[in-house]
Amino acid sequence: MKGILALSVVVLMVSLTAEANRNQNREHRQQGRIKAGVASGELTKREARKLRKGQKHIDHLQQKAMADGVLSPEEKARIEKAQDRQNKKIYKQKHDGQDRNDNAATPAQPAAPNGPGTPATPATPAEPANN
């Protein structure tokens, strides 16, 4: 009887660890997607800040759920739902058509035809050929 109880405790601990690792891996992937969006310019600084705040909220939910050492089905569902919402927010922000360059103070100036700092020279007509 003690063996069955010990085995049940071990199985429970392994399943909790596996679930925690799964949530942690998903969270790392989402953080990576946010970093990639910032690096590629798909996310503005404001969007990235809001998405990181959402990630912190999920961290808080996980810490609160694991405080007693048991992850109940309700806690698991709440964390998964929060991760699903965050996943959709990341996708939406990365594909909303805004990018970091939309917030630039001045638009990029086209390069001068002769290069920067070189004054433009007037075009001279070609000399007629002597036949």
Image (spheres, rainbow, N blue to C red):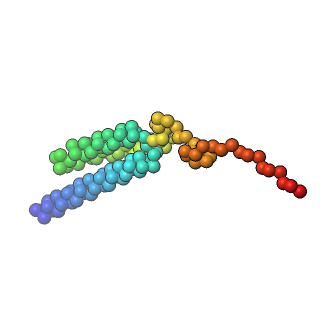
Extreme-front residue of the structure: 130
Q: Residue furthest left?
A: 2
State the residue at coordinates (29%, 42%): 56
Q: Position of residue 128 (x, y in %)?
A: 83, 51
Farthest residue toward the bottom? 3
Q: Position of residue 15 (x, y in %)?
A: 25, 57
> As rendered, which of 68 and 11 lies closer to the eye?
68
Quadrant where the N terminus lies? Answer: bottom left
Q: Quadrant of the C terminus?
A: bottom right
Q: How many labels, in total?
A: 0
Q: Quadrant of residue 130?
A: bottom right
Q: Residue furthest right?
A: 131
- Depicted 78 relative to depicted 24: above or below: above
Residue 49 image offset from top left, x and y in percent: 35, 40
The residue positioned 43% from the left and 43% from the top of the image is 43
Residue 124 sits above or below residue 7 on the image: above
On the rendered structure, is 100 left or right of 28?
A: right
Q: In front: 85, or 56?
A: 56
For image coordinates 23% across by 54% down, the residue present is 16
Residue at figure coordinates x 18%, y 60% from the top left: 10
Q: Is residue 74 among what the camera can see?
A: no
Residue 74 picture quarter: top left
Report whether 45 appears left or right of 116.
left
Q: Nearer the viewer, residue 1 or 104?
A: 104
Tell whether 81 sits left or right of 20: right
Is any part of residue 128 visible from this angle?
A: yes
As displayed, is residue 4 above or below residue 71?
Answer: below
